[in-house]
Image: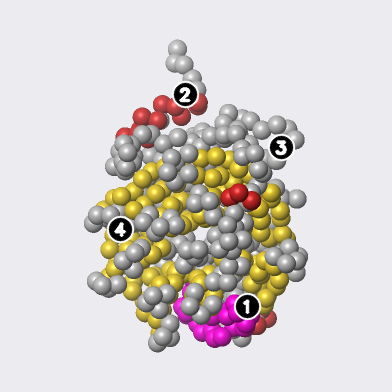
Amino acid sequence: MTRPIDRREFFRGSASLLTAGMALYPRAQGWAAPETPQTTPGDSHPYKVKWYEFTEAPDSDTCWSLSVGPDGRIYASACAEGVPGGVVKVVRYNEKKDGLDYLFSLDEKVNDPAESGRATQCKIHYSFAPSMHDGVLYMATHLSGPPIDQPAYSPWLSWHDEKRCFRGSALLAFDTRTDEVKWWETLIPKEGCRCLLHDEERGLLYALSYPRDHFIIYDLKKRARRDVGRLGSINAQTLFLDKQHRVWTTNDYGHLVRYDPIKDRLEISPLVLPHNPVFQTGWHSVFYDVVASPGGDCVYAVTWIAQSRLLRIWPNEGEWPKVEDLGPATQDRDPTISVDTFRDHCGGLTFAGDGQLYYVASRWRDPVYNPLSAEHKDREGVVWRLNPSTLERQEVARLEHPKNFAQYVSRGAVDHQGDLFFGHVGSRPSGIFKVEMPADRKKENAHLPIRMWG
């Protein structure tokens, strides 16, 4: 008689496949099979967590963008993409009153009102980019919000409809010194901006368009855009810059893609980024979030697939970068049971004043791998700290939403005082979390060197 397969045994057995599949990505000091992060004892000084709801943006349902500005203060996007006629409001954390300031409703600044009948300027999606020399924070909008009299919006269906079509991603230059919009214009006609990057030394903005997934270059001095070409059909959620001014992202099948400004062309890596070989092929293994190390020699990235993987990439080494697989960012789970990427998620990567990497990974109720108590919420967002020298991970805090779950964090940032902030997705109104760092881990101007991409 055939013995039934024990799911836990099946998962343990898949470890050999995992080891074989990841052998292409050795660690610097000898590769070992990656381990799922385990909780370790916390610090003696707690990380205090506080929730700030977008009370003056009651229709907001997501906060996709959260970044530190050139002034060292935290900016966030109160997006309203699920309501007809919804528009995004730009919000800033006010440390003096320990609350939020609502700077402006974006539709009013770009003359594209919510009542126009077109798809709306509903969100800023990973598209804050600072300019340090003049205090400007660039931002670009994205699409998905339906016209005020329609329940939903399809960019393909309305592509040739002059009355319904999204006018295009609006690019704004916001002066953080005067709180004024210096100028704006349409960055990408008919399309949204999925993510934005600023190469300040060369005066260029880089963007990925949606839905066509094109690579866009915008010259700030000439105020001119150029379309370099199509990457695929599944947008990466971030771009990053290396020391040679090359711009990096990913394509549909998990290959690194780079734009070399000297060659003026897009190049594709022959290797696929690390992924779980038991139930994934690399398809949809695009970047979700990327942050540079303080020295800029490497970046830490997380992929946007079920059971996101944490990676360390050295873009300045070799013809193609050395890629280290640091293992899954979220909990173990039964690979025979599907889990959506809203539940199984990691984001909010940021370096703090203590030189450690912080990020938020989801954790959810599972009868085998996470049997939570009855009074515990089914999902939670766990703040992890990773030591770049040892790669040790430690759980330092949990995000607690007063009414909803808090497992989905979009972006993270550290302000000039050294405290952490995280954007939240999954409630209405949406909002942001502040994680106050212990005094011995804080320092002034902890946001420097500043992140130049959304």
Instruction: Using the numbered discs, state the Cα–Cα distance from disc 4 to disc 2 in whole angstroms.
Output: 41 Å
Q: Which mark is residue 316?
A: 4
| Sequence-first disc among 4 and 2 | 2
Q: Amino acid at mark 4?
A: Asn
Q: Kindly identify which residue carries mark 1.
A: 106
Q: Tag 1, which secondary structure?
A: helix
Boundaries of the magenta span: 169-194
Marks 4 and 1 in Cβ contact (< 8 Å) = no
Quadrant of the rendered structure where residue 100 is?
bottom right
Q: Which mark is residue 376?
A: 3
| Sequence-first disc among 3 and 4 | 4
Instruction: Using the numbered discs, state the Cα–Cα distance from disc 2 to disc 3 in whole angstroms.
Output: 27 Å
Q: Kindly identify which residue carries mark 2.
A: 9
Quadrant of the rendered structure where residue 434 is?
bottom right
Q: Nearest to the eye among marks 4 and 2: give it.
A: 4
In this orientation, does residue 341 appear? no
Q: Amino acid at mark 2?
A: Glu
